[in-house]
Amino acid sequence: MEQIQRLIPLEAIETEILVVNSRFITNLAPAVSAEEARAFIAEIKKRHPAATHHVPAFVIGHGNSIITHSSDDGEPSGTAGRPALAVLQGSGLGNVVVVVTRYFGGTKLGMGGLVKAYGDAVREVLKKVRYAELLPTTTLMIVIPYRLYDQVVRLMETHFGQVLGTDFLEEVTVTVRFKDEEVEPFTNVLTNLSAGQVEPIVVEQNPESIFPLT
């Protein structure tokens, strides 16, 4: 069975748009649980205590196993939370939360205007998102002779390894994380390169590591 690509935002970001003098400030962040999403929403509310509305939406999980939530936070029913959530779901992201903070500018936007404004606010922040994937990974510790170090570094780069630490002692000890699908190809080439002298040690296996999309 083909694995679902589990896209998530790499980091928290903020954007702002102006609609008929109302400011719409959108904050987006990764969140691994509904509790974490709600904590982020509370944080944004504290950051903007004078704002008129704080409209939240989040999607936790991927595929058929997701939790979604949205709220109009005092805007007319159906004009804020649902449009924000619809745009968020259309992005394909999971484990993501947004809060659209509105400072009322003195002119009412009407039902259709509100729907468009909240949807546009989320679309704007999505333009700035750097995407990452949740992937199963394996972390290896590799002890490398200095004569092979440069070659092994290039090999790790070829297989998209994330170097987590390097110690230069009598030999070089590197801790590196790979997507599970890259572990066997990397290890096979490493064995040939070192004539079987370098044997990676599995340090950790994680079913949900964050890998930036290349």
Image (spheres, rainbow, N blue to C red):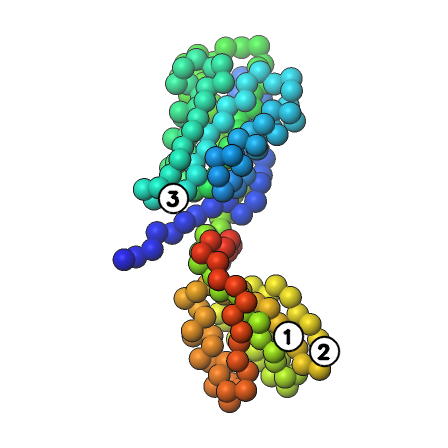
Taking the spot 57% from the left edge, 72% from the top edge, the residue there is 141
Quick check: 106 above or below 59? above
Which residue, given by chain and number where applicable, does mark 2 sit on?
A: 169
Image marks 2 and 1: residues in contact by CB distance under 8 Å: yes
Which residue, given by chain and number where applicable, does mark 3 sit on?
A: 62
Kind of element beneath mark 1: strand
Residue 26 visible in the picture? no
Give the distance between the C-alpha atoms of the residues marked 3 and 1, in whole angstroms: 36 Å
Q: Amino acid at mark 2?
A: Leu
Kind of element beneath mark 2: loop
* Label 1 packing within 10 angstroms: few (<14), some (14-19), many (20+): some
Instruction: Tell which residue pokes out farthest to the right in this image.
Output: 169
| Image coordinates for residue 156, horizontal then vertical, percent | 54, 72
Which residue, given by chain and number where applicable, does mark 1 sit on?
A: 173
Instruction: Tell which residue pokes out farthest to the left in this image.
Output: 1
Q: Earlier in the sequence, mark 3 or mark 2?
A: 3
Q: Amino acid at mark 1?
A: Thr
| Left or right: 12 as drawn, with respect to 182 | right
Image marks 3 and 1: residues in contact by CB distance under 8 Å: no
Taking the spot 71% from the left edge, 82% from the top edge, the residue there is 170
Quick check: 6 above or below 107? below
| Left or right: 36 as drawn, with respect to 70 | right
